[in-house]
């Protein structure tokens, strides 16, 4: 590591991030076609989210929620600064990135839990199978619609996240995607 860079993203955050990308992509792309793979990918995603929440409470400086959660007014002000190309550079997550992490974690949990419901109602499998046994067909249908809606909303947020990464990378002349592989960012803030 040279003196012009600083370690920002610890190995857990980096492995979590890219494993989550793969897990969500597999779950999203398999749907009903490969139900067992779809379910296991969903379990993986939920397990990863659980670990990330714990790491957000006890992890390294830039991984902790206390480091990057901002008030809604701060997030809005930051987004306005982005549109005016005067957004401040952050060593860790910027206010919009921090907010998006929370949104994505919540959406992933809701998507996974609704998937548990669908799996239990329609396949009599998974952790909610006993609870969902004997539920009327419309319950499974409604849960499936909710699950698909949440998965699509999550994908939309992922695309907005990627757009935000691209915009921040361009505005601050740094490759944020590369830093999620290496863990390193430029030292200076500003």
Image (spheres, rainbow, N blue to C red):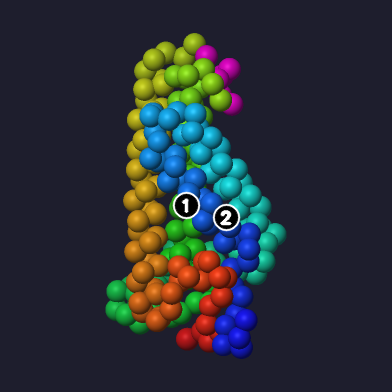
Q: Residue at x 36, y 22 (%)?
A: 141
- What secondary structure is found at the residue carrying circle 1? helix
Q: From which residue to which does the magenta span run?
A: 127-133
Q: Report if residue 71 is visible in the image.
A: no
**Residue farthest to the top, as pictured:** 134
Element assignment for label 2: helix
Residue 53, x across and y down, in percent: 61, 52
Residue that appears at 48% across and 70% down:
178
Q: Is residue 3 left or right of residue 36?
A: right
Q: What residue is drawn where x is 52% and y is 14%? A: 133
| Quarter of the image with the N terminus in it | bottom right
Asked whether, in this view, residue 128 is left or right of residue 174, the answer is right
In percent of width and height, residue 92 lies at: 54, 72
Crowding at dot 1, Cα within 10 Å, few <14 / some 14-19 / many 20+, comes out as few
Magenta segment includes 130: yes
Residue 91: image location, x then y, percent: 53, 77
Q: Which mark is residue 21?
A: 1
107 versus 183 height, above or below: above
């Amino acid at each position: 590591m040279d003196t012009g860079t600083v370690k920002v993203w610890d190995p857990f955050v980096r492995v979590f991030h890219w494993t989550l990308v793969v897990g969500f992509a597999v779950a999203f792309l398999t749907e009903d076609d490969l139900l067992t793979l779809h379910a296991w990918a969903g379990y993986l995603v939920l397990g990863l989210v659980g670990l990330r929440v714990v790491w957000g409470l006890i992890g390294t400086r830039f991984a902790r929620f206390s480091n990057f959660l901002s008030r809604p007014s701060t997030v809005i002000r930051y987004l306005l600064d982005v549109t005016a190309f005067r957004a401040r550079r952050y060593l860790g997550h910027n206010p919009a990135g921090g907010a998006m992490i929370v949104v994505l974690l919540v959406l992933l949990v809701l998507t996974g839990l609704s998937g548990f419901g669908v799996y239990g109602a329609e396949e009599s499998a998974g952790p909610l199978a006993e609870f969902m046994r004997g539920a009327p067909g419309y319950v499974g249908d409604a849960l499936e619609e909710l699950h698909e809606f949440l998965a699509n909303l999550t994908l939309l947020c992922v695309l907005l996240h990627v757009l935000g990464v691209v915009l921040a990378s361009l505005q601050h002349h740094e490759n944020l995607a590369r830093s999620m592989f290496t863990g390193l960012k430029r030292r200076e803030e500003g």
